[in-house]
Amino acid sequence: MLDQNELPSCEAQSGGVIRLIEIFSQARSANLLGWARRDLRSTAGNGLTGESNSVMPRKLTAAVLGFLVAACSSIGPATVPHDRIDYGSSIGNSWKEQTLLNIVKLRYADMPIFLEVSQVIAGYQLQSAVSGSFTLGNFTANLIDRLTAAGTATTGSTYTDRPTVVYQPLTGVDFLKRLMTPIPPSSVLFMLQSGYSAERIMPILLDSINGVNNGSNRLRRPPEPKFTRLVELLREGQLAGAIQIRIEHAKDTGESSVLIFGPSRDPELAEKGREIKTILGIKPDLRELRVNYGGYSGKNDEIDMMTRSMLQIMLEFAAVVQVPESDVVEGKATPGLVEAPNAPALNGPPFRVLVADAQPRDAFVAAQYNGRWFWIADTDVQSKYTFGIIMLLFSIADTGIRGSAPVVTIPANQ
């Protein structure tokens, strides 16, 4: 039996078999020798039975040509639509579960571990084989009005789906760069410019801005009233389109961000712009402000942001994860803000992670840790929105020096 690589081309295969069928059809229809009665006999051990001369060629033609069409068609393009969606969904779901699991692990003073899917290689293999034989003749010397035909046809195929998934742990320089490096201020501004609400972005990403402190769930520190008011004013400026962002590239200083307060004919909006500048301690007549990372410098012509790293952001949300009270009493989990007596209101956008002993059925994302299930309800749209921002921030923070991915060699016939 030959596999597909050993067979001749599709055209050659089809031409040879079609010629074989033509010979049989011509012999069946030849009346020169007086073969008026064509009673084809069954042949023991072959793949075709002796049938009427009008049925047998049609069955042979359909079987062989049908197989050739299948063998000569490509399976690659047909796999793209469902493979792309299926692999993308699986990777996305596992990414969400890994992120939630690491947030929960931080609540239990456990080390977060990130394992990335660096490569996905879908390998398919289709092998086919076809063989056949055909005999036609008069096997009785004394009888010339009988024609005996015998034929065999054998087909076979093998389909193999052999995916290769390459994982790479996040360690060393990658870990430091991605988890412990603060989010650039330009990313904060870009998210505001993209339409993400300042009431969600700034409480998540900022520790302080021009010396005005944000709150902290893990430190049980409420935000300063000025910070809360600043966030409200920036949100109103977003909705009115009064705040613009520009990125400048200089040879000496590199990339820098500029926050622009555009001119407004609305007296109320102009007053809010002046209030923003008063909270930040900058000159009221300035329209363009350079944005830097770091502590407050005291200058009245720039904005200094102390942004958080991804590890800090995860620790903030870990403090509001619900855990069994027994785990806190036994010292397995650190006391969070939700369990603390007389605790202040939660800081930042809504984020509610529930805990259950059994796997939830209506979960947006669920992760199992220490025999319990931690999950976000699919009906909790506010927590889902906040969790989506966390996932986006991981992509923004992915600016570290990527380690060399392992080299995967796939055989040519895969």
Image (cartoon, rainbow, N blue to C red):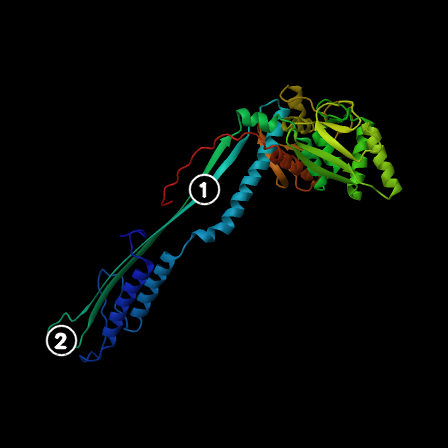
* Closest to the observer, 38 or 357: 38
Position of residue 283 relative to residue 80, above or below, is above
* Residue receiving disc 1: 121
Image-based side of 15 in relation to 259, left or right:
left
Looking at the rendered structure, the kind of residue marked 1 is: Ile
- The residue furthest left is 142
Looking at the rendered structure, the kind of residue marked 2 is: Leu
* Other residues around mark 1 within 10 Å, as few (<14) / some (14–19) / many (≥20): few
- The residue furthest front is 251
Numbered label attached to residue 143: 2
Position of residue 143 relative to residue 297, above or below, is below
Q: Position of residue 84 (x, y in %)?
A: 52, 47
Q: Kindly state the secondary structure of the residue where label 1 is placed.
A: strand
Numbered label attached to residue 4: none
Quarter of the image holding residue 73?
bottom left
* Closest to the observer, 306 or 101: 306
